[in-house]
Every structure is written in structure tokens, then in C-alpha cells.
Image (cartoon, helix red, strand yellow):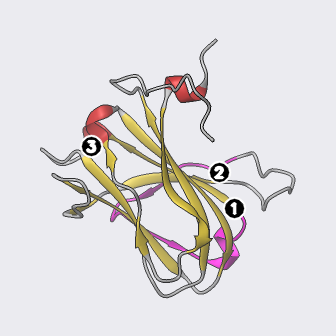
Amino acid sequence: MTRTVEEFGLIPLYNAKDWAAGADSETVDMGKGESLDIVVTTGVLTVPGTWSLFSGVTAGAKTTALPFTYRLSGADYLGIGADLYGAEVAEADGILTVSATAHDLRMLVLHIDAADLPVDHRWVTMVVASGTAQFLAAVGILRQPRYAPPVSAVPLS
């Protein structure tokens, strides 16, 4: 039996805190996989904010805004339907505006395919814009990794 960490590349992008000052995520090397799902869990969100995806030819470069799709959980945490997701929504400009009424206490799964990146762009960075209280955490799930993620034989302490 394989485990998730042996089958997918798991990349911590944002730790759980208020990102009101804005921040770039860890940069993901899409040259190592076929697609990327970014799982974002939100806490309290106030005043509309924006999340964006960018690609570049080097780690951390934000050269081109990336169109992506996302699905939103059907209810707030612990609510009936919190584990169900709505229809896929396309963000053609690569910018998602989040609000307290629609995205507070929810989970969103953003998706991009490596094949959709501009030529020679293999690095992807998520950007949380500054200016709003945005409590969130995010992890990237790299699908079909071309290299098996390393598995430590010694537990991390």
C-alpha cells in the first residue's frame, strides 16, 4: 500500500496565520509533475482580497499571470456539505477575489496543468495580496511527480 507522501509531491506553501501583509508562497517546480492542486483552507477573511498565480523561468519569478480553475467547498467547516465541492470555476486572468461572505471558513482547491504554462516557464508562485485580514494555510499537491518524493526512514522530530 502506498501512502500519499510516496505517491504525490506535497509542498507546504503557506503556514496557518493572518497574511494581511501579503506574501508569496513557496515556488513550485512544475517541471517535476503534470499538474498542481493548491489546497487552501481559510479562516476569517475581511474585506475582499486577491490571490493570484504566476509563472516564471526561475524560482520566485512572477513573470506571467496564470489562468487557473478552482472548486469551493459547499459549506463552512463542520457544516453539512463541507466535504463536497461546487462546480469548477475558471479564473482566466489568474486572479481570484475572495470575500468573507463567499470564502470565509472554507476550503478551495486551485488547479493548473503543467502543459498550460508558457514556454520555458516551469516555476509557479501563489501571491496573496496585502491589505486585508486573510487567515489561511495552503499546501501544494504535485500530481504525477516525475521523481519519487524522498521518504525518510527516520521519523522527523
Look at the numbered disc 2 and give the secondary structure of its residue: loop
Tag 3 near tag 2, CB within 8 Å:
no
What residue is pinned by disc 1?
A: 106
Q: Is residue 89 magenta?
A: yes
Does 84 sit above or below residue 152?
Answer: below
At 44% from the left and 78% from the top, the residue drawn is 22
Q: Is residue 105 left or right of residue 108?
A: right
Q: Is residue 43 left or right of residue 139?
A: right
In percent of width and height, residue 55 lies at 25, 55
Residues 104 and 102: in front is 104
In percent of width and height, residue 150 lies at 44, 27
At 40% from the left and 22% from the top, the residue drawn is 148
Looking at the rendered image, the disc whose residue lies closer to the viewer, 1 or 2, is 1
Q: Would residue 128 be seen by someone viewing this image from the given angle?
A: no
The CA distance from mark 3 to mark 2 is 23 Å
Magenta stretch in the rendered image: 85-105
Residues 109 and 4: in front is 4
What residue is pinned by disc 3?
A: 116
Q: Is residue 99 left or right of residue 23?
A: right
Tag 1 near tag 2, CB within 8 Å:
no
Does 143 sit above or below residue 27?
Answer: above
